[in-house]
Each structure stands twice: as C-alpha cells, then as structure tokens.
Image (cartoon, helix red, strand yellow):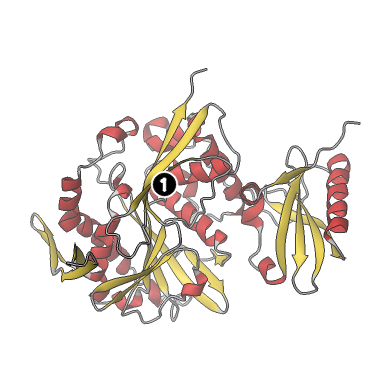
Amino acid sequence: MAEIIIKELDEKRFNALAGFSRSPASAYVSKELAWYSNEDETILGVLLLDIIDDDFASVILGKDEGGRFRAFDFQVSFPDVDSALNWLHNTIKWHTCNSPKIFPQGDASQPLDLFTPIVPVERQHIYFTHLISSSMFTPAREIIKNIMPSYIDVDGNFIEQFQSSGFDSRLWELCLYAYLTEEQLFIEREHITPDFLVKKYGKTVAIEAVIVGRKLDNLPQYFKISTKLKTPNEVLIEHENAMPIRFGSSLYSKLQKKYWELPHVNGNPLVFAIADFHDDQSMLWSSTALINYLYGFKHDFYYDETGKLIIEPKKIETHRVGGKEVLSGFFFQPMTEHISAVLFSASGTISKFNRIGRQAGFKDPNVLMIRMGLCHDHDPNAAFPKMFKYIVDEKSKETWGEGFSMFHNPNALYPVPEGLFPSIGHHHFKEGLIVSTLPEFHPYASFTYNLRSKK
C-alpha cells in the first residue's frame, strides 16, 4: 500500500476549503493552531488549543452530501501538542484508507451550481461567460465553488440572476457573505429581506445589499476596460454631481422599502451595503463622491506656513445634473435616522474573488497575477494616498474585509456596535470633519492584472 501523505495547510487554504462551515462559536472555546489534510484534501484535520481547559484537541473533517466540510471525528483533552498531533495524523491516514469520500449528516441541501449555464448565451452577463470559460479566473471559480455549499438562496433565483443581468448584485452579496463569515458573525438568512441578519454578543444588525447599477445603454464590454479609464479632471467633474446622484438614487430606492418596520429588523441597527458597478472600472474612483453625499460636505486642504496639513470642510447644499437636482447629506434627510450606517467597498468585484482564490493556492500555473492601487497613508500630514503593488501568490494576505469602510450615521436611532465589525475602516462625522479609524493597510482602489506566459 502506498504511503499516506499528510500535508500541512496554511490558514488561507484551510479557510478556502472549510472556513465557511466554521461556527463562530468555536472561537469562544478554542484556538486553531494548525491545519492538515491528506493528499487529495478529502480529509482535513485541525489542531486546537482548548482555551477553557488549557489542553489540546484534534478534529477531523470530511465533506457531507452537500459538499460542506463537517466534523465527524474528534478527540479532546490531550496534555500536549505532540500527542494531539500524533492522533490527528494517524486518524487522517486511517480515514483516508478506510472511510468513504462523503460523510452524510442527514441535514444537508445540495449546493447551488452557479457555473452550469441555465441562461442562453445571448442573455448571459459577459463577465459570467468569461468567468466560466477563462483559465485566468480559475482561482475565482474555485473559491466560489467552496462558498456555495454554505450559502442559502432565500428567494430562489440566485443562479439565474448570477448568470445574467444580476451578476454584479449577486457577486456583491457573495462578497458580503464572505466578509461577514470572516468577521465570525452568526449569519441568519431566514428572511427574504433584508439580505442578512448578523448576531453576536447579544446584538443584532440587519444588512441590505444595494448596488449602483448600469443603465441599459451602457452594457459592460469585457475588452474595452483599458480604454475606459477617466482622466483626473473627468473624475472631479463626476464627483461634484453625477456620482452623488447615482449613489443617492440607489440609497433612496432602498429607503422607500422601510425595512425597519419589519418585525425582525425593528429596534435593531440597519445598514445599507453599497457598491458601485455603474461603469467599467468605476470603483477605482467613485468612493469620495459617496462620502461627500452621505454627509453633505467636501473637504479642501492646504499646508500652512509651518508645513502642517489643514483640512477645510465645505458644506454642499445640492447636486445637479441637467434637470435633476437632489439635496446633499443623505444622513440628514427624512427617514434616514432609521439607517444606522452605510457599508462600502471598492473591491467587491470578481478580481477580489480571483485574488483570494489565488493566495489560497488555486491557480493556472501559466498566469501571473499582479495587484496595484492606492492605499491610506497613515502619516497625519499626508494629503494623498500611497501607491502599492505586489504579486498575488500564496504569500499574499488579503482578507475579505480589506478595503471595506463603514460610514456611521450621526443621527442614527440605533448606532452600529463597531465591535461586531472590528477588521474594517470606520468613519464618523464630527463638526464637519470625517474622523476615521482605519486598519494598517487600507486600500482605496486597486487594479488586478492577469498576465499569461507564453508556452
């Protein structure tokens, strides 16, 4: 009999395979120390520190009939790491030789199959078509496949929309789900609206996903991306009026739904999670317009005679494009006291899934992935972000929450507990200024290049 090889996995690989099956409750009683698998990754093992009893435990996982990794064998109360690890390795080997590939649990539904087309080619979203056909998107396909066994389709049309006109909005929902899971929140999807209820520490927050979508006369064009980037002057013009109106239109439409009147939302914070898909690469430049619109202020700057950076807030009254005019300051409009915060990311695109999948080891060996963009400069005297650039590979450490920002409503009836969302940026409005708490690395926008080598 051939020798059974035991592989040590890094945390990124384990999370890609089984992280969406992990209960947030596990962190209350244990700390994961190391992760292992057999050669074909059908059996996984986790070495744990029991933080209650201060000893060690080992857990063995295999896929259930729905494709989720579930614990089916374990041992506790090991006095030291070596004995726990020895049991873990031997048990993985035993199950590899003697157990089936599937470990039925009797409570698993079949996962959503996003990649088998049910929509005719002429109705498919162009990014979906490339996602299922191009080897450059192998990492994204694999990471999404591993998410889907744990994802619940509450309204029954996720597959059809993901493959057609709803690709952007459904991808944004998946990105939110991955982030909320990473944040170790208890996620409920028992209701059609809003999209997520998250709970922890006795607190509940409702989250509704929303996007700035495309107009019918501006269809996505996969091969014209590089020719669509706006000049700095064009971006400034868009920031003044057009982009705030786009954000405002999407947020106002959601506001009219009055989710706060639903019994499961009433009395809890309600968050609108918004992403901008209105044009090719629009996420690269549109975020500042959202901040200006939410709080009704823009911020000029200058350096005084000592070289100190001075921020000067300026009130914005309205935004106007053609015959359409809207009031600025979403958080100061009627009914918005029911909206506790707006969650935003410029990274909720297929490139995010591609990068997360690539750093977890899913790849086409002939494709080199490079990420470059702008990130926050923590120098208090810096007026502009810094540039960054790196090769995306197994050494990368991007998280799902990287680049997320929560803009808090100063007039919220039910403020969001920041402790439920500790890994992201938080922004508050105080006396005309935005006061921000940001992670050490906080990207504002980035672009991912996939370069194929010649065979």
In the rendered structure, the answer to whether residue 48 lies left or right of residue 95 reads left
Examine the image and state in which quarter residue 351 appears: top left
In the rendered structure, the answer to whether residue 53 lies left or right of residue 66 reads right
Q: Residue furthest right?
A: 1
- Return the residue nearer the eye: 265 or 416: 416
- Return the residue nearer the eye: 3 or 409: 3
Amino acid on which disc 1 is placed: Thr
Above or below, 407 relative to 452: below
Q: Which residue is mark 1?
A: 349
- Return the residue nearer the eye: 75 or 403: 403
In the rendered structure, the answer to whether residue 320 lies left or right of residue 36 reads left
In the rendered structure, the answer to whether residue 404 lies left or right of residue 45 reads left
Instruction: Tell me residue 369's x, y (percent).
Output: 47, 35
Q: Residue furthest left?
A: 323
Examine the image and state in which quarter residue 4 appears: top right
Q: Residue at x 27, y 61 (%)?
A: 290
Instruction: Tell me residue 230's x, y (percent).
Output: 22, 42
